[in-house]
Image (cartoon, rainbow, N blue to C red):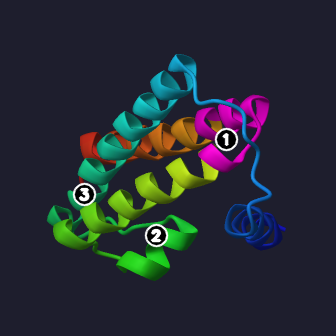
Amino acid sequence: MLRIFIIALCYMHVTGCAHSDPWTKTDTALYMGYVGTLAYDAHTTSEIRHYPCLQESGPIAKQVLGLQPDAAATWQYMGTLAITNYFIARSLPSTWRKVWLGANGIEHGSAAFNNDKLFDRGC
């Protein structure tokens, strides 16, 4: 289902069917919040390699980064997510843009928070 949604968004963006609602200050604030949680997630994900007993568990990140993510690959992956999500958000109507950015920010913030809890427990 997610794959169909992403393909539909890409199609709309490429063909010019994307929504033309103006980008607002609220959108900028939500996007910056998303990038902040993404950076926090990138930092904690890149620290997994220092804990031999821990492994990346995100279904997509695990496939892209491996079980013990390298710092450079992690930051490159998260940077790509930041740019991609900006273009997706720009193509959405204003109402859905807020949902998209908020949900992604919550998802990455939750992942980073869970990583921190794992680090606190140690091996």
Circle 1 residue? 100
Q: Is the magenta stretch mostly helix, strand or loop?
A: helix
How far apart are the two marked residues, 1 and 3, measured between alpha carbons? Answer: 35 Å
Q: Residues within 10 Å of mark 2 (few under 14, many from 20)?
A: some
User: What's the residue at 32%, 65% (across, down)?
Assistant: 54
Horizontally, residue 116 falls left or right of residue 93, namely left
Residue 61 is labelled as 2
How far apart are the two marked residues, 2 and 3, measured between alpha carbons? Answer: 22 Å
Q: What stretch is highlighted in magenta?
A: 90-102
Q: Quadrant of residue 120?
A: top left
The residue type indicated by label 1 comes to Trp
Quadrant of the frame with the C terminus: bottom left
N-terminal of the pair, mark 1 or mark 3, is 1
Classify 87 as above or below 6.
above
Circle 3 residue? 123
Q: Quadrant of residue 114?
A: top left
User: What's the residue at 55%, 18% (across, down)?
Assistant: 26
Classify 33 as above or below 66.
above
N-terminal of the pair, mark 2 or mark 3, is 2
Residue 49 colored magenta? no
